[in-house]
């Protein structure tokens, strides 16, 4: 599952979180009135009314409950990475957290194990933010072994029963974590020069541990990266994808095998100098790859305002969508193959458990979903606030999807305002009631109606 990390980064060491920024300029009053009228017509014709504030529920209760369900975390902790274990007898949502304030006291856990069948959120093992701030987490599907990448340096495993292993790869920042049956992958960057540890500041490797074997660099020490890894993703064919700050995407075939391939850069020249904060691969068709772009924090010369967004490949990374004149996503009235949300940064992208579904968190615009591999997009309602006068803002850092018992599919989203779960069946029902607004009222993908300001979208309350 994907993990997210700070927008302001010092590689030695990595600080807690990004600084929140506001969205785009407000639309004019005519557009506001037209949009309000269009939405009013939709509501009059049966669009479901917004839900009232709901009491927190166990995450799996979202399978049979409409709307967003609040998954409580103890104050002042905020989820910055998620991993879901759906195996019978375990069924947990792990949240790597950071402190949103100085409250909470020393010794509070920075990894929470959330029971998907009960309203509990418990500290997991001995993770302490003062000594083990966690950047990324992943779970091995076969054993439930949790892997955590530490901002202070190193990787540590924890068993499902809470037993914490030894911290390895010390002196290396690891936020990009991925796992397969019996194997853990970590994109790690050296923090300092240390001959004894064999580190060289800013050098980076993708490391692999199979079973309980020692960690080793993937394909040995032949391929060396320089910089910071944002994300790792493993597709259904065993190909591993890695994104580097300012250096685009790389792939390697048969990553968990005895004979992995060689690292290969993907995409065109423009893509190879960009920063993908998040990667996702369609679970049914590994040729469909999503890359959520953002500005670089270490190679600012690669930043080009207006050329971010969600770039999509339909041929396994050989080519990606470009930047059309209107920046549409290939929906009604937009050029085919253009990059959606081109002027915005995509903080998180995840593929749904079924093929074709993809979810994007667009910084300052909110949450979007497509069920046709990115051809058309629907703006999701934001979750309701957790109390009177409190509104959730359109800045979601992290998402994850999971399927339970072969039938229930859930989307999890987290940000500074909280952690939430929603069934994808309910999202499909919301999409069924949506209407397309004329392009004069906003970009064609804005089918729910653009709010008066970027941070004033519809909410479940």
Image: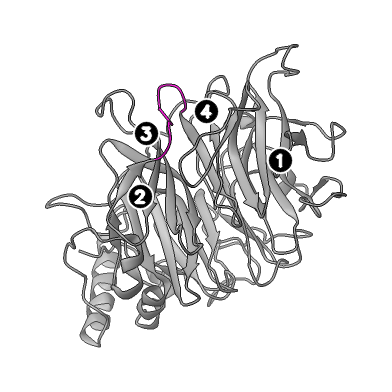
Indicate yes or no whether the magenta region holds residue 406.
no
- Residue on which disc 2 sits: 25
Q: Residue at x 51, y 25 (%)?
A: 14
The percent position of residue 279, horizontal first and vertical second, equals 61, 53
| Secondary structure under the numbered disc 2 in the rendered image | loop
Give how far apart the Cα atoms at labels 4 and 3 are.
15 Å
| Secondary structure under the numbered disc 1 in the rendered image | strand
Give how far apart the Cα atoms at labels 3 and 1 are.
25 Å
Report if the CB atoms under discs 4 and 2 are less than 8 Å apart.
no
Give how far apart the Cα atoms at labels 3 and 2 are.
39 Å
The percent position of residue 448, horizontal first and vertical second, equals 36, 71
Query: Which dot, 3 or 2, sits closer to the camera?
Result: 3
- Residue on which disc 1 sits: 209
Mark 2 neighbour class, 10 Å CA radius: few under 14, some 14 to 19, many 20 or more? few
The percent position of residue 400, horizontal first and vertical second, equals 48, 57
Q: Is residue 155 visible?
A: yes
Report if the CB atoms under discs 2 and 1 are less than 8 Å apart.
no
């Amino acid at each position: 599952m994907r993990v997210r990390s700070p927008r302001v980064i010092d590689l030695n060491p990595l600080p807690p979180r990004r600084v929140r920024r506001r969205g785009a300029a407000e639309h004019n009053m005519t557009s506001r009135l037209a949009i309000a009228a269009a939405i009013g017509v939709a509501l009059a014709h049966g669009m479901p009314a917004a839900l009232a504030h709901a009491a927190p529920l166990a995450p799996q209760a979202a399978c049979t409950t409409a709307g967003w369900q609040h998954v409580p975390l103890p104050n002042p902790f905020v989820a910055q990475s998620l991993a879901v274990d759906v195996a019978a007898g375990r069924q947990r949502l792990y949240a790597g957290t950071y402190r949103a304030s100085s409250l909470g006291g020393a010794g509070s856990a920075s990894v929470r194990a959330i029971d998907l069948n009960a309203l509990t959120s418990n500290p997991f093992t001995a993770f302490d933010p003062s000594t083990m701030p966690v950047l990324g987490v992943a779970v091995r599907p076969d054993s439930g072994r949790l892997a955590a990448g530490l901002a202070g340096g190193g990787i540590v495993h924890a068993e499902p029963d809470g037993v914490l292993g030894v911290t390895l790869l010390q002196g290396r920042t690891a936020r990009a974590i991925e796992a397969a049956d019996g194997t853990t992958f970590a994109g790690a960057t050296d923090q300092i020069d240390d001959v004894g540890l064999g580190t060289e500041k800013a050098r980076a490797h993708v490391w692999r541990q199979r079973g309980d074997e020692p960690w080793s660099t993937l394909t040995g020490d032949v391929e060396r990266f320089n910089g910071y890894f944002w994300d790792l993703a493993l597709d259904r064919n065993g190909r591993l994808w890695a994104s580097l700050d300012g250096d685009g995407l790389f792939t390697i075939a048969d990553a968990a095998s005895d004979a992995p391939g060689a690292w290969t850069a993907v995409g065109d020249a423009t893509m190879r100098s960009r920063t993908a904060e998040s990667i996702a691969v369609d679970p049914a068709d590994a040729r469909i790859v999503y890359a959520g772009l953002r500005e670089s924090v270490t190679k600012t010369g690669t930043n080009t305002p207006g050329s971010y967004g969600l770039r999509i490949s339909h041929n396994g990374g050989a080519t990606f969508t470009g930047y059309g004149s209107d920046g549409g996503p290939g929906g009604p009235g937009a050029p085919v193959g253009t990059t959606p949300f081109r002027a915005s940064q995509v903080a998180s992208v995840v593929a749904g458990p079924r093929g074709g579904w993809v979810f994007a968190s667009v910084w300052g615009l909110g949450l979007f979903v497509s069920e046709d591999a990115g051809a058309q997009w629907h703006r999701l309602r934001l979750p309701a606030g957790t109390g009177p006068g409190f509104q959730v803002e359109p800045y979601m850092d992290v998402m994850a999807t999971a399927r339970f018992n072969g039938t229930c599919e859930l989307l999890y989203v987290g940000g500074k305002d909280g952690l939430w779960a929603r069934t994808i069946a309910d999202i499909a029902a919301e999409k069924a009631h949506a209407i397309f607004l004329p392009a004069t009222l906003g970009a064609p993908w804005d089918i729910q109606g653009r709010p008066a300001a970027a941070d004033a979208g519809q909410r479940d309350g």
